[in-house]
Amino acid sequence: MTHLQGTHSVWLKRKQTQLLLQVLNEGDATTRCVGGCVRDTLMGVANADTEVDMATDLPPKEVMARLKKAKIKCVPTGIKHGTVSAILYEGEKALVYEITTLRVDMTTDGRHAEVAFTDDWHGDAARRDFTINALYADADGTLHDPTEQGIADINAKRVRFIGNAQARIEEDYLRVLRYFRFHFRLTPDLALDAEALAACRGAAVALRGLSGERKQQEMYKIMFLPAADRAVQALHEAGLLSPVIGVEPIEFAALTAMLKFSDDPLLRLMALLPSADAAQIMATTLRLSKKQTIRLVRAMEFPLDLAALSKVLYFDGAEAVADRALLALASSGEKGVMGTAFKIALTEAAQYKRPKFPLTGLMMQKVGMSDGPAMGKMAFALEQWWVDEGFPDIAAVEAELKKRLAKG
């Protein structure tokens, strides 16, 4: 196979892609599409929304100069490493193309690399991670396979590191997670490559040293996979999951069930966790945001109290109720009386509109209360009462306030 063709190469035929290649290929320059867009097209999984990356022998400043001359919006997103983003539009839809100058790694510590720009396509290919990601395509779809293994591995449905697997991993330890992600996205039914698996296992300690943000990004991508449960189980069996998320998973059946209920990566991660304490550890390890951490802990801290559903919805929120209901369904199954009850809770959470507590400071002042701690305590106690009583109207709240004040 030496040429891209068929419906899966629609991204290449798009006029914006062709315009960009025309601008960057003027004179004796060479720019080609590279990586995921080419790989996914050959594997029959690309579509109109496939992201397009390009490699060029032009220096980054020349790339920007040509784009500006052609009045194409561009941003120096990673210009230190040779990457410029071009933004074109298809109607109101923004299409972002990452264009990176050919480069070779000069030094690397497993997390960062110092690069040098080059015009050597073989050198650029050699520094990439997997053979199937080192394929390039010209504007007319002509394929280039500098490693001479990429197309064969596509045909064999095999994910392999370029050259020595251990050496590729030591250049960037995040490639361990990328390996599992690509394998279980593209070839989930095949065995893991023996050399790759051995090299990945050897990187367990180094994985702990990667930044939480980078591990988080890759784990989210893994959790989006249809075979996410098989991917994380394989990571666990290789001794690699705990170094990444910081805790030992309970088991994988709940995650397998969760795949049917939700594609939310954070909820899928929750299905692996044994407790709220574990959720807090994972949140710290993966450097989750404050909002994400609060969601994790709220979902994991207590089981869903179906008998007090309206109270839980009010105080903990619809999201926490939905998360707890889905976790319960994934753990205990969706059939039977409890399964039906959890599904009802999900429906109520989806439709929930939080009622507004009618008590105001002005109401409390009118009955003789002064601003201060006592007013705050009264408001808190009355809100608890109001929820327990089923959210009565303002008249009932005023009457209860006066009754409590009269009792002193």
Image: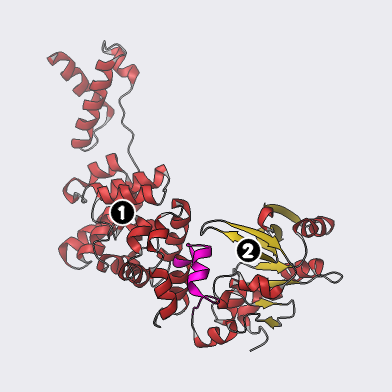
* Marks 2/1: CA–CA distance: 44 Å
Residue occupying the point 43% across, 72% down: 199
Q: Which residues are magenta?
A: 159-176
Q: Is residue 187 left or right of residue 323?
A: right
The tag earlier along the polypeptide, 2 or 1, is: 2
Q: Is residue 68 left or right of residue 264?
A: right
Give percent across and percent down for residue 22: 80, 70
Q: Residues within 10 Å of mark 2 (few under 14, many from 20)?
A: some
Q: Nearer the viewer, residue 234 or 220?
A: 234
Q: Is residue 52 above or below residue 267?
A: below
Q: Is residue 325 magenta?
A: no
Give percent across and percent down for residue 214: 48, 55
Q: Nearer the viewer, residue 235 or 288?
A: 235
State which mark lies toward you, 2 or 1: 2
Quarter of the image holding residue 183?
bottom left
Give percent across and percent down for residue 86: 71, 59
Q: Which residue is mark 1?
A: 323
Quarter of the image holding residue 267?
bottom left
Q: Which residue is mark 2?
A: 105
Residue occupying the point 46% across, 61% down: 218
Amino acid at dot 1 = Asp
Q: Residue placed farthest to the left in the image? A: 407
Q: Residues within 10 Å of mark 1 (few under 14, many from 20)?
A: many
Quadrant placement of the N terminus: bottom right
Amino acid at dot 2 = Asp
